[in-house]
Image (cartoon, rainbow, N blue to C red):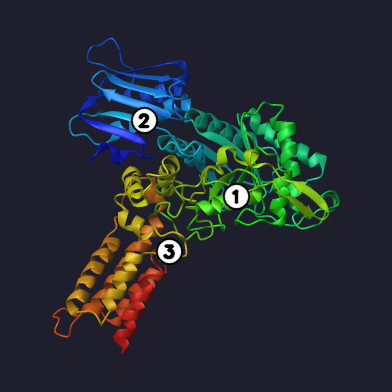
């Protein structure tokens, strides 16, 4: 298999020669600015004496004048060794990750080798990451540490800490973290730094904060200072999933009661945080915020106020035309950026399952524009808007999105199941790095290959790959079920459809229950549901296909009903909208 089939994300430019470079014995050398890249390679290949003639030299350096975009790199592997040049430290690190991925591809001749190759590569989107922003059981500390390493392997450069059910993030936002939890946050920050992942700490004070109260703003800054001392350097303020109206009298007196008044309160809190906390500390990255009005593309009173009053450099998270979406177009991005008057980051509620814990979404990212940064609408943020008699002037287009780049990037909201999330998140990384080359099917195949345990559970992965959540859970199986029932088709065609359906149902019914690893552990209840769902479908198919002269008696309708009842006892939803309707149609036929 081509070694490039093991690389995600797909490089921009890559060529391969006929020979290979044996890295079984190599010496890694690099300048100080590339120390994390050097460390990553030495962890894999070990220290070697570069003076030995049998040792291949791997050199890494950073060259800001190399003509590469930010986070870009070149990689050359040939008879003289390997040279990685990064536009910056992140680029050098990502070049090292590509080398590690190439060396990890199966080779029958050497324990570690890479093809003779030339790579020139860089990301399309500056922000590529995940946001642990779901409701339900938060990830464990071990989950998060593993996720940061996964992010590094796939060139995801941001992780946002925002678990809704962490009480100190949301309900008890004023209270400092207990020392034990603070220490864990510090470990995450340190690991993120080692993996070139931006650790973004989010607070969600909107359930109870009195925005106009200086003491409340001071409490917010004090909480932020606690985690600053633990190493956090990037922050987000979230005002999502709260009442749209101001609930405190002091806020209504300060910001008014007109439509969208809460946007003025949220903008004021963000401005105070930026000016009184981030600026004095010399924070290198601006604040990110989630508005209460975070879905949709049109202008509203809330967005007009936000466009006018939110500091121009604050990045705004947005979820698309709705909270959970199947499609995001270039026009959606452009219209939404115009409505907010600010640059956007996509909070992509994919593959999150907090709205239906009985489902897992294991398919690829689909329906996302590969040209998100079309030109912004004429006059974005530049109109005067009359809100209760006050003229609010928005930011100029160039302030909103220099060069017309409305979308800064994507942060995907994952599954509650951390390991299972990696199948879908691998495809998110592929999309965000190389938009034009993104192919969901190809990316998904590579993700399955790379996530331990996914290949063994492929029938389940395919059965849980539909997106958006309301889509047909398996168009292919739905079509086979319909064809197997079609009395109007030729008998040979119907028999062929039944044979295909039998093969697919058998794959589900025979799913292994003993696959090792975290993925299989997380998906155990879906494996059990899939096995029983496959068995119910097979029982129905046996009843449907049985002829009067068949020597072996088909299962009775009662036996089919029992198999269906067993399948539907599972809370885990695997093809619940596909197989049970088929089984019931077969039973209806048997009853007539």
Q: Residues within 10 Å of mark 1 (few under 14, many from 20)?
A: some
Q: Quadrant of residue 483?
A: bottom left
Q: Secondary structure at mark 1?
A: loop
Q: Earlier in the sequence, mark 3 or mark 1?
A: 1
User: Residue lying furthest top in this view?
Assistant: 51
Counting labels gives: 3
Res. 573 mark: 3
Q: Quadrant of the C terminus?
A: bottom left
Q: Quadrant of the N terminus?
A: top left
Q: Along the line of sight, which residue is nearer the eye, 316 or 158?
A: 316
Label disc, if present, on residue 377 of the rendered structure: 1
Element type at mark 2: strand
Question: Which mark, residue 120?
Answer: 2
- For the view shown, which residue lies furthest in the bottom direction? 592
Is the C-beta separation of discs 2 and 1 under 8 Å? no
Q: Residues within 10 Å of mark 3 (few under 14, many from 20)?
A: many
Residue 527 position within the rendered picture, expressed as x and y whole percent measured from the top left: 36, 58
Residue 473: quarter of image: bottom left
Q: Is residue 566 left or right of residue 389?
A: left
148 in relation to 376, above or below: above
Q: As displayed, is residue 589 above or below residue 260?
A: below
Residue at 29% x, 63% y: name it.
509
**What is the spatial separation of the Cα atoms under label 3 and label 2, in whole angstroms?**
43 Å
Instruction: Choose mark 3 or mark 2, whichever is in front.
Output: 2
């Amino acid at each position: 298999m081509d070694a490039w089939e093991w690389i995600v994300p797909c490089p921009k430019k890559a060529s391969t020669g006929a020979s290979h470079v044996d890295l079984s014995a190599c010496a890694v050398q690099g300048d100080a600015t590339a120390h994390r890249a050097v460390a990553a390679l030495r962890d894999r290949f070990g220290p070697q004496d570069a003076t030995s003639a049998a040792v291949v030299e791997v050199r890494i350096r950073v060259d800001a004048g190399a003509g590469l975009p930010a986070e870009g790199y070149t990689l050359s592997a040939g008879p003289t060794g390997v040279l990685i040049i990064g536009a910056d430290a992140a680029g050098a690190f990502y070049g090292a990750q590509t080398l590690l991925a190439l060396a990890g591809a199966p080779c029958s001749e050497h324990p570690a080798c890479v093809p003779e190759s030339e790579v020139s590569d860089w990301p399309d989107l500056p922000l590529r990451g995940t946001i642990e922003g779901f409701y339900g059981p938060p990830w464990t500390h071990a989950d998060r540490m593993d996720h940061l390493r996964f992010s590094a392997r796939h060139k995801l450069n941001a992780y946002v800490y925002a678990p809704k059910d962490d009480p100190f993030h949301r309900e008890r936002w004023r209270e400092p973290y207990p020392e034990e939890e603070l220490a864990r946050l510090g470990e995450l920050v340190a690991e993120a730094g080692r993996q070139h992942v931006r650790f973004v700490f989010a607070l969600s004070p909107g359930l109870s904060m009195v925005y106009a109260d200086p003491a409340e703003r001071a409490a917010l800054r004090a909480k932020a200072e606690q985690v600053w001392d633990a190493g956090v350097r990037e922050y987000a303020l979230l005002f999502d999933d709260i009442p749209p109206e101001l609930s405190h009298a002091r806020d209504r007196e300060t910001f008014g009661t007109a439509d969208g008044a809460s946007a003025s309160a949220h903008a004021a809190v963000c401005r105070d945080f930026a000016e009184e906390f981030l600026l004095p500390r010399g924070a290198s990255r601006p604040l990110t915020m989630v508005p209460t009005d975070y879905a949709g593309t049109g202008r509203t009173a809330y967005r007009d106020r936000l466009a006018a009053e939110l500091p121009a450099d604050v990045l705004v998270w947005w979820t698309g035309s709705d909270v959970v979406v199947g499609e995001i177009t270039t026009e959606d991005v452009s219209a939404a950026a115009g409505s907010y008057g600010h640059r956007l980051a996509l909070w992509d509620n994919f593959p999150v399952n907090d709205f239906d814990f009985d489902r897992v979404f294991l398919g690829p990212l689909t329906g996302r524009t590969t040209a998100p940064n079309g030109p912004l609408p004429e006059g974005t943020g530049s109109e005067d808007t009359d809100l209760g008699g006050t003229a609010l002037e928005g930011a100029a287009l160039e302030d909103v999105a220099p060069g017309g780049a409305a979308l800064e990037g994507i942060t995907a909201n994952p599954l509650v199941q951390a390991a299972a999330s990696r199948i879908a998140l691998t495809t998110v990384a592929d999309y965000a790095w190389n938009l034009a080359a993104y192919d969901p099917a190809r990316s998904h195949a590579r993700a399955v290959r790379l996530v331990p345990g996914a290949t063994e559970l492929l029938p389940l992965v395919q059965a849980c790959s539909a997106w958006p959540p309301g889509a047909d859970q398996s168009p292919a199986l739905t079509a086979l079920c319909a064809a197997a029932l079609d009395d109007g088709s030729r008998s040979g065609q119907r028999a062929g459809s039944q044979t295909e359906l039998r093969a697919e149902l058998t794959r589900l019914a025979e799913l292994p229950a003993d696959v090792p690893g975290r993925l299989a552990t997380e998906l155990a209840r879906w494996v059990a549901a899939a096995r029983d769902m496959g068995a119910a479908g097979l029982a129905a198919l046996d009843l449907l296909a049985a002829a009067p002269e068949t020597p072996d008696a088909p299962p009775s309708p009662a036996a089919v009903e029992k198999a269906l009842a067993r399948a539907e006892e599972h809370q885990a939803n695997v093809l619940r909208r596909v197989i049970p309707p088929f089984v019931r149609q077969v039973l209806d036929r048997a009853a007539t």
